Image: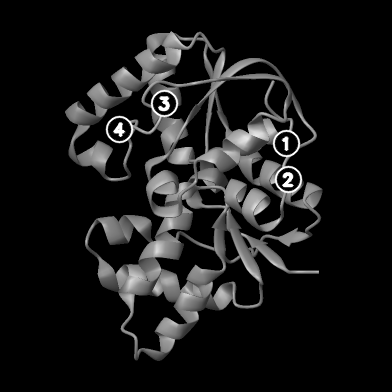
Amino acid sequence: MAKVGLFVTCIVNTMRPEIGFASLKLLEQAGFEAEVPRDQTCCGQPNMNGGDKAGAKDFALRLAKLYAPYDYVVVPSGSCAGTIRTHYPDLFDENDADGELVRALAAKTWELTSFLTDVAGMKEVEARFDGALAYHDSCAGLRELKVKQQPRTLLKSVEGLELKDLPDAEVCCGFGGLFCVKYPDVSGEMVRKKLADIEGTEARAVAMGDAGCMLNIEGALARKGSDIKVWHVAEVLAGLAK
């Protein structure tokens, strides 16, 4: 059996560990016994976005060594998976010995729903969600990893779930890592527009594949006093969303 290492991500670990447990449950349903290396750290995305290439390289090499024993690395985050798969290789020269190890990590790293559908061949899940739910595409997952239909295919198999089309689902919510810190006014207007689109679907909940987007949208909904729930797609697919 292939060995799968789950990269939990910083935000999931500190803010919403349920996403990690949901991911493990889904990987087990797909027939894999996944492990969670305890020594995993940040993927280095903040360093990369902030121009700290040396720091990002340190994180990349550390993760490459930590996950070397695994056949696949699965990540419940489009942005972190995108950082590892598409940006890590650019940090190292082709003749750099460490670069070979990092490129091997990049090649075997997958976003969760993409792994479940494109690698494991999963087309349906054992879960129930009563009511309408909208889905928001995270920028990195969509543009860097081509994650679009995969989560929707699995969500449509959830018993009782009515999947609503979200207008401008591919438009950024305004989080964008350091973007929301550098440009708070612009970020605030973007999430305001996103909330209006979500509310327009009349869905009782919205799901997405990135915890960063979740924090941004959930916080904005809470400040507005909305009762719309925000879930990670893994929580819905694992039957943890109610």
Q: Is residue 98 left or right of residue 134?
A: left
First of labels 2, 4 by sequence position = 2
Q: Nearer the viewer, residue 160 or 13?
A: 160
Residues at marks 4 and 1 touching, judged by CB atoms closer than 8 Å: no
At label 3, the amino acid type is Ile
Q: How is the image coloured?
A: one colour
Disc sitting over residue 238 in the figure: 1
Say which label, 3 or 2, has the lower sequence index: 2
Which numbered marker is on residue 214? none
Helix, strand or loop at label 2? It is helix
Mark 2 and mark 1: Cα distance apart in space: 6 Å
Q: CA distance from mark 4 to mark 1?
A: 27 Å
* Quadrant including the C terminus: top right
Residue placed under numbered mark 2 in the picture: 26
Report which quarter residue 155 is drawn in. Answer: top right
Q: Are marks 2 and 1 in contact (CB under 8 Å)?
A: yes
Instruction: Identify residue for label 4.
Output: 174
Which residue is label 3 attached to? Answer: 217
